[in-house]
Amino acid sequence: MIANPIKWPDNARVAVAITFDIDTDSILHMAHPDRADTLVTAASWLRYDSVAVPRILEMYRRFGLKQTFFFPAWCMERYPHLVDPILKGGHEIAHHGYLHEHPNEQSKEGEAYWTERAIDTIVKMTGQRPRGYRAPLYNFSKNSADILCKNGFLYDATLMGDDIPYILKCKSGSLIELPSHWAMDDWPPYVHSIEMNYMMPIKSPDEAMLVYMSEFEAMWEYGGLCVAVWHPFVSGRLARCARIAKMIEDMQKKGGVWFARMEDIALHVKNAVDDGSYNPRVDELPYYDGRIPELPKDWKGHPASHKGC
């Protein structure tokens, strides 16, 4: 099923990273800049991170896991009490924008500014440059890879183009891509928010876990990479976090699972590429640079607007 699987450490069947994006209320200010201060209930929901992050860290401690947290730099500045426990636990803090801004809605210069501003904060608060990046809301731009390469990043964790790590190549260098996809995100089963304009029926933890575990089982069977993209204020709620603990326990009992920080996975991939034991697929970016010539000039993005329909 996977034509070119990578060999994981200690003959593990699958690599698993249970990552959390600590967005807190940055997304509220981005969505409602002029009235975020009036949306008190929404802010309280997002600020649940202050309850959930310690809970998640204690869960990781119990199971002996070191994992990765993607942290908008503004949130690090605003909530520094969440930063030190993550670092003391041996976990990785990776780049997730400055204020959860969307790269593909900015100019190249604007994206570079916010990327570098966030790097400065991460260096100041952690003592090292970030090795990894995930674009807020997966909104990777056609300039993102180039900006990341220029700033010395090792890996990206935004794109969805494979079941195993692959390479992003751009004019300024290359990155290791550690892909995931929407089935491993916690917004579809759990988030119901008027303020975020996302109102879906809320699933029980067991229902959500059916999806997550089906992805894990397939990755375990065929040697893939299983990356969860979760949020403390969503999956860190009590019943959901308790179900994650059971998931980790079940995975450990099954065996053949390498739990690792994203940086460690990327370094393993880099070493495997360097020693010739892994020959990953390469995607050259950007995929496109502007409108494709085959589209009629009057095409507006909906089939009904095309005169040939």
Image: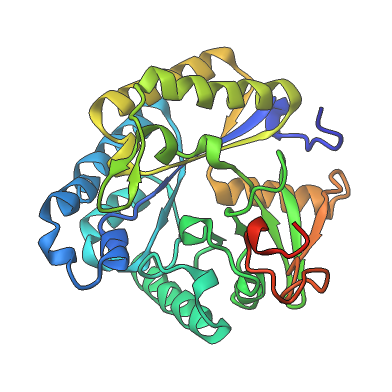
- Position of residue 252 relative to residue 159, above or below, is above
Give the image's coloring scheme.
rainbow
Q: In percent of the image, x 45 and y 34: which residue is there?
A: 65
- Position of residue 153 relative to residue 181, above or below, is below
Q: Is residue 302 left or right of residue 39?
A: right
Tell me if I can see residue 17 in this picture: no
Tell me residue 34's x, y (percent): 20, 73
Q: In percent of the image, x 58 and y 64: which residue is there?
A: 140
Tell me residue 224's x, y (percent): 70, 33
Tell me residue 261's x, y (percent): 53, 44
Tell me residue 72's x, y (percent): 37, 63
Q: Quadrant of residue 55?
A: top left
Kindly give the residue lying farthest to the bottom in the view shown.
109
- Position of residue 275 relative to residue 296, above or below, is above
Q: Is residue 16 left or right of residue 124?
A: right
- Of 204 and 268, nearer the camera is 204
| Quarter of the C terminus within the rendering | bottom right
Q: Is residue 125 left or right of residue 6?
A: left
Q: Quadrant of residue 104?
A: bottom right
